[in-house]
Each structure stands twice: as C-alpha cells, then as structure tokens.
C-alpha cells in the first residue's frame, strides 16, 4: 500500500529550524520505502530587499549516524524568489535551517510511504517453496506455439 501526504513549513528569524521525522508506523506493517520530496522553496513577500536567505538541510548519510549539511536553496529579493529543487530525502529524518537571512521562506513538498503487512523476502520464500523446478514435467509430443499463425503451407 502506498501513502502520500503534503508537507510544508515556514522558516523565519523567529523560527529558523524545522524538523521532519519519519512517522510512527504500527508494528504489523513493514515499511518498504519512505521519502520526503521537497518540491518548492519560496521567499515571502515581506523578505528584506538585498538580503540572501540560505536554507540548509541536514540528514544522515549512513547507519553510523554520520550526517551531511548542505544548502538546498539560496534566495534573494529581485533575483531568485522561488526554486523547484525536487530534492529527495529517503528513509530518515531531516533538519532544515535558515542559516542566513531573516525570511520568511516557505518550503513545501510531499511525503511518500510504501508499506505493507509482509516483508517482500518472506513472500518470495513462501512462493518459491511451493514450486520446485525439478518437478516440472514437459510434454514432448505437444505442438509448438505458433503465435496464432497457421503452419499450413498455401
């Protein structure tokens, strides 16, 4: 089963940090994939002229807890008011921070989650146990397939 939902927040001088965390999933479900996709980052109309507004994302890059911090948007009134970065953050939490400027900066996107009641590996094992290749029988006298064409010569 797949699930999508809107995600958005505002960064400003008063609230320069926003945190995205993977939501809690009931134990009976297995999450196959989860990601946050940032679709648009816009500078608010009340942003100060001549001021750069830099949005940084911080996320884990491996299971050891190592993180990366990278700017995902640099906005300025009169130059760049809106970006469509289409950046994806798979399987983890992300911290967004307004590292320069006073904003407001509006960030919106969506979350996508693919989950089910079973682990794909368990399903594969269940079906692969049902049929053993050594037990397959072939009818050697059967006519070959002709894809709907007649074998008769005219």
Image (cartoon, rainbow, N blue to C red):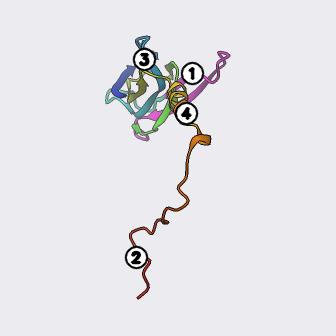
Nearer the observer, 18 or 45: 18
Secondary structure beneath dot 2 equals loop
- Residue at 51% x, 20% y is 94
Real-space Cα distance between discs 1 and 2? Answer: 62 Å
The mark found on residue 150 in the picture is 2
Does the CB distance between marks 1 and 3 fall below 8 Å? no
Numbered range of the magenta stretch: 54-80
Question: Residues at badges 2 and 4 in contact (C-beta under 8 Å)?
Answer: no
Residue 73: x percent and y percent? 49, 33
- x, y percent for residue 129: 55, 30
Secondary structure under tag 1 reads: strand
Circle 4 sits in a helix, a strand or a loop, which is it? helix
Residue 7 lies within the magenta run: no
Q: Is residue 2 above or below residue 94?
A: below
Q: Which mark is residue 128?
A: 4
Mark 2 or 4: in front is 2
Label 2: few (<14), some (14–19) or many (≥20) C-alpha neighbours in 10 Å: few
Dot 3 or dot 4, earlier in sequence? 3
Q: Earlier in the sequence, mark 3 or mark 2?
A: 3
- Label whose residue precedes the other's in the sequence (1 or 3): 3
Other residues around mark 3 within 10 Å, as few (<14) / some (14–19) / many (≥20): few
Q: Earlier in the sequence, mark 4 or mark 1?
A: 1
Mark 4–mark 1 Cα distance, whole angstroms, equals 38 Å
| Distance from the alpha carbon under mark 1 to that under mark 3 | 25 Å
Q: Disc 3 designates what residue? A: 29
Label 1 belongs to which residue? 59
The N terminus lies in which quarter of the figure?
top left
Mark 2 or mark 4, which has the lower sequence index? 4
């Amino acid at each position: 089963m797949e699930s999508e939902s809107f995600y958005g927040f505002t960064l400003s001088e008063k609230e320069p940090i926003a945190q995205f965390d993977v939501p809690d999933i009931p134990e009976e479900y297995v999450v196959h994939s989860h990601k946050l996709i940032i679709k648009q980052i816009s500078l608010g109309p009340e942003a100060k002229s001549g001021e750069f507004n830099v949005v940084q994302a911080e996320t884990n890059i491996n299971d050891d807890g190592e993180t990366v911090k990278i700017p995902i948007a640099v906005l300025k009134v009169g130059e760049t008011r809106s970006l469509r970065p289409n950046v994806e953050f798979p399987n983890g939490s992300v911290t967004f921070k307004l590292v320069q400027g006073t904003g407001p900066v509006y960030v919106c996107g969506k979350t996508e989650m693919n989950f089910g009641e079973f682990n794909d590996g368990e399903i594969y094992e269940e079906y692969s146990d049902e049929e053993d290749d050594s037990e397959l029988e072939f009818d050697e006298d059967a006519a070959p397939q002709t894809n709907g064409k007649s074998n008769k010569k005219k």
